[in-house]
Image (tube, rainbow, N blue to C red):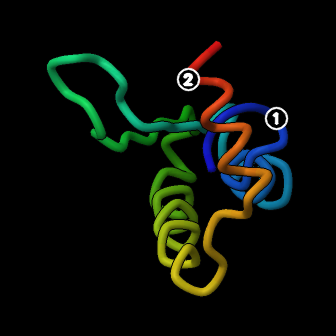
Amino acid sequence: FGGGFTSRLFADVRTKKGLAYGVGGGVGTTYDHPGIFQLAMGTKSGTTAAAIDALYEEIDGLEKNPFTADELKKAKDSILN
């Protein structure tokens, strides 16, 4: 969802809409905060609201377009490696 240049967030918020320099996220894997979902992005102050709206659109879109098996595999591999 949010890791790397081919992630959904990067493809939509940065590449397609040009609203952020970088965008990403993931699920926490530390022993004291497992499973915490976090998102981050770097954007201009003038596009902050639009960029946040784009993030929410992607999150809401997960209901209609859940993660694919390939996306889940990439996410799991990035945690394990």
Residue at 56% over, 23% down: 79
User: Residue at left 77%, top 60%?
Assistant: 17
14, 29: nearer the viewer: 29
- Quarter of the rendering occupied by the C terminus: top right
Q: Quadrant of residue 61?
A: bottom right
The x, y position of residue 42, in whole percent, is 55, 32
* In-front residue for pair 44/74: 74
Identity of the amino acid at label 2?
Answer: Ile
Q: Which residue is label 2 attached to?
A: 79
Rendered position, 4 above or below 71: above
Is residue 12 rendered to the left or right of residue 49?
Answer: right
Q: Nearer the viewer, residue 45 or 30?
A: 30
Mark 2 Cα shell of 10 Å, populated few (<14), some (14-19), many (≥20): few
Q: Which residue is mark 1?
A: 5
**In which image quadrant can residue 44 be found?**
top right
Q: What element does badge 1 sit on?
A: loop
Q: Nearer the viewer, mark 2 or mark 1?
A: 2
The residue most toward the top is 81
Question: Looking at the picture, how far across and down is residue 15, in whole percent?
Answer: 84, 49
Q: Secondary structure at mark 2?
A: helix
Asked if disc 2 and disc 1 are in contact, CB closer than 8 Å, the reply is no
